[in-house]
Image: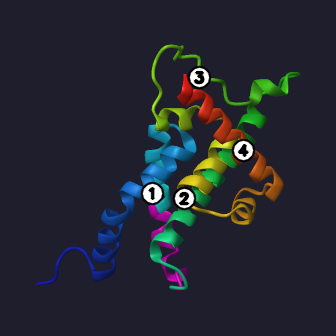
Amino acid sequence: MRSRATRPQAAFEALYRAHVGRVYALCLRLTADAVRAEELTQDAFVRAWERLASFRGESAFSSWLYRLAVNVVFLSQRAGRRRALRLFTTDDPAALERPADGSGTAGVQLDLERAIAALPPGAREVFVLHDVEGYRHHEIAGLTGIAVGTSKAQLFRARRLLREALSR
């Protein structure tokens, strides 16, 4: 008698179990939103299942999967920005940017994850991709559509903001 799951499904389930934690952590660091990170993690694995045949083995499976997850996050963010621009009209372009966290964290010791989550989106993306995930600036530029110099500037800004947040 044959099992319910076919061999490819069972193999993919094993890959899912092996990598879901790291993919979720990556999505969480890029979005700073636990619910959104869960959704994007699932989206990344659905996309991986759909594109598994395109994996050529030129790099580690984990590298392919994490790059795919980064792309899923960025595509989602771009779609969200386009949607926001269609839904809101304003004379103040700053009103369309993500609101700052007004939770009043003065006096509260911030840990690194909270400090990363509090970074402005561009600085957070570059910091996570460069310092956490190990991408180089030219790779970040290709993934995000920004210039290499902008990537370097965002990383400098992120590190400065993290130092300030963690020294309080």
Above or below residue 107? Residue 127 is below
Mark with earlier residue (2, 4): 2
Q: Position of residue 47 (x, y in %)?
A: 51, 65
Q: Secondary structure at mark 4?
A: helix
Q: CA distance from mark 4 to mark 1?
A: 25 Å
Q: CA distance from mark 2 to mark 1?
A: 11 Å
Residue with the mark numbered 1? 23
Asked whether the beta carbons under mark 4 and mark 1 sit within 8 Å of each other, the answer is no
Q: Secondary structure at mark 2?
A: loop
Mark with earlier residue (2, 1): 1
Residue at x-position 51% and y-position 64%: 66
Residue with the mark numbered 3? 101
Bounds of the magenta segment:
45-56
Q: Residues within 10 Å of mark 2 (few under 14, many from 20)?
A: some
Is residue 121 something one can see in this rendering?
no
Mark with earlier residue (4, 1): 1
Q: Secondary structure at mark 3?
A: loop
Asked whether the beta carbons under mark 2 and mark 4 sit within 8 Å of each other, the answer is no
- 145 relative position to 26: left or right: right
Quadrant in the picture for the C terminus: top right
Residue with the mark numbered 2? 133
Mark with earlier residue (2, 3): 3
Above or below residue 51? Residue 40 is above
Helix, strand or loop for the magenta stretch, by majority: helix
Residue with the mark numbered 4? 156
